[in-house]
Amino acid sequence: MPVWIGKFFMLNILKMIAKTKIVTEKSPLIESIDFETLQKDLSRFEKLDYEVKRALSKSLTIRHLDSGSSNAEEAELLALSNPVYDITRFGIDFTASPRHADVLTISGPVTRQLKIAMDRTYNAMPYPKIVVAVGDGACNGSVYQNTYACLGRVDQFLPVDIYIPGDPPTPEVILKGLLMCKLILIEKKGRL
């Protein structure tokens, strides 16, 4: 777009602001808020039992390990941090250290080169620990299962708590699985 067209549009916007004296949009009025829908949403939360409320209010830290995936699962996990899904509002966050992690998410089939890293990461995590297999490669080995570099799926080497299948799974499905991790974590802490 030529520079003069951009200047023309900007000049029109400035003229409109000068005439109306309105620079931003007005905030919605209190009367326009749908209180019935809001009340229904709050009543659904009140119907949850105490243990579920307690589990959902806890924070959760995740250490992700790529054990040989195609990076499609990593892109979907990264999408969880964008403003659309915003997993931090649920108290879920990623950590670089396995010593601070509650959950270990693994994507891709286990390769020969990364099996040692997977074992070390799992052993460095504090108890109780949850393992989540993300994607078809981690859940069932996918098409790579019988290749020379792959040893197999994740549950052949680690105890997997949650399977999130898909190639790749959508962020919504991953988020549901991570929220289930909160419930499992409370259950495991009760057993210690």
Image (tube, helix red, strand yellow):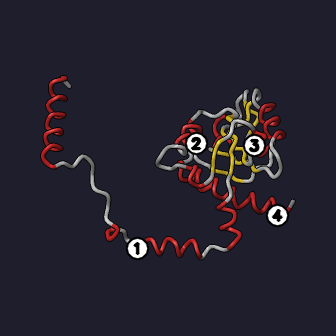
Mark sitting on residue 188: none
Q: Position of residue 23 (x, y in %)?
A: 24, 46
Q: Is residue 191 left or right of residue 77?
A: right
In this rendering, the label closer to the viewer, 4 or 1: 1
**CA distance for labels 3 and 4:** 20 Å
Q: Tell me the quadrant of the picture where the N terminus can be found.
A: top left
Mark sitting on residue 35: 1
**CA distance for labels 4 and 1:** 38 Å
In this rendering, the label closer to the viewer, 4 or 2: 4
In this rendering, the label closer to the viewer, 2 or 1: 1
Mark sitting on residue 190: 4
Q: Residue at x 54, y 43 (%)?
A: 81
In this rendering, the label closer to the viewer, 3 or 2: 3
Viewer-proximal residue among 155 and 23: 23
Q: Tell me the quadrant of the picture where the C terminus can be found.
A: bottom right
- Residue placed under numbered mark 3 in the picture: 100
Q: Amino acid at mark 1?
A: Phe
- Residue placed under numbered mark 2 in the picture: 77
Which SS class for mark 3? helix
Q: Residue at x 47, y 75 (%)?
A: 39
Q: Residue at x 13, y 40 (%)?
A: 15
**CA distance for labels 3 and 1:** 40 Å
Q: Amino acid at mark 4?
A: Gly
**CA distance for labels 3 and 2:** 19 Å
Which SS class for mark 2? helix
For disc 4, the neighbor class at 10 Å (few under 14, some 14 to 19, many from 20) is few
Query: Which one is earlier in the sequence, the residue at label 2 or at label 1?
Result: 1
Q: Amino acid at mark 3?
A: His
Q: Position of residue 93 (x, y in %)?
A: 63, 46
For disc 1, the neighbor class at 10 Å (few under 14, some 14 to 19, many from 20) is few
